[in-house]
Image (cartoon, grey):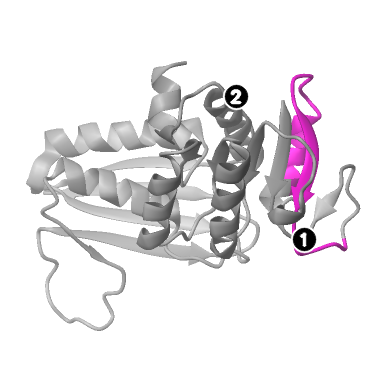
Amino acid sequence: MKIIICGCNGKMGKAIAESVKKFENFVVVAGVDINHSEKNEFPVFESIEQVNLPADVVIDFSHPSALSSVLTYSKKNKIPAVICTTGISCEQIEDIKKAAHNVPIFYSRNMSLGINLLLELAKNATRILGENFDIEIIEKHHNQKIDAPSGTALMIAEEISETLNNNTKYVFDRTQSRLPRSKNEIGIHSVRGGSIPGEHEIIFAGKDETITLSHHAGSRNIFALGALRAAEFIYVQNPGLYSMKDMIKNS
């Protein structure tokens, strides 16, 4: 399977390139990155429009500003895309949905199978505990991550909110309000420091008891392997929008 890595010289792009070496059924035919200071084992282009090599799948771990060109390239060349970039806006998600009418698109804000298991556990806990427990989400990442809260934290909050029939509001900062916590709040807190690959914790705090669900990423390799699995999955799909749920369900 011939892969184009968008953001190939970023931390996740490098992790994917290294992970590919462990498998005989993958090869990186091109990379896309505005940073040309790195030495790569494949040709690197400044923009995806410049790529003139045949490919089977695009894996995008770049920047939200590059999303439009990735989707355009994918549609023009009928190449499936795996969109892993975080910090994507609501308007850009709509662009992804529109592109999926013409080409298979896999979109997930977290490529870890463990995180997606955590989501299911969180939804089950929410159904059982209901409105009797306060819910707080804490996410921790390295000091170079520019978006906060993380896309994964928002994904967790959205799944919990849907389970509670969307009767919730997100609170990111309590310093400006000297009021007791309301029952329909979901607190979301961000920590940035060091080289933390990614940690997410969901706290269900009730009367006289607290339940905590957590996921710790030991390295970026788990996200790279998830992206490669997604590439295998999306390559054989019909046009449409797919997620980790679809991949897990069909695995």
Mark in the foreground, 2 or 1: 1
- The residue tagged 2 is 232
- Residue depicted at x 29% and y 51%: 157
Q: Nearer the viewer, residue 95 or 145?
A: 95
- Specify the amino acid type for callout 1: Glu
User: Residue 89: percent from the left, percent from the top?
Assistant: 41, 62
User: Residue 224: percent from the left, percent from the top?
Assistant: 64, 37
- Residue depicted at x 25% and y 83%: 176
Q: Which mark is residue 85?
A: none
Q: Is residue 67 left or right of residue 148?
A: right
- Specify the amino acid type for callout 2: Glu
Q: Secondary structure at mark 1?
A: loop
Nearest to N terminus: mark 2 or mark 1 = 1
> Which quarter of the picture shows residue 125?
top left
**In the current view of this chain or complex, which residue is farthest to the front?**
76
**Residue 139 visible to the viewer:** yes
- Residue depicted at x 59% and y 36%: 78
> Which quarter of the picture shows residue 50?
bottom right
Q: Which mark is residue 46?
A: 1
Q: Is residue 139 magenta?
A: no
Q: Secondary structure at mark 2?
A: helix
Quadrant of the snapshot with the N terminus: top right
Q: Which residues are magenta?
A: 14-37
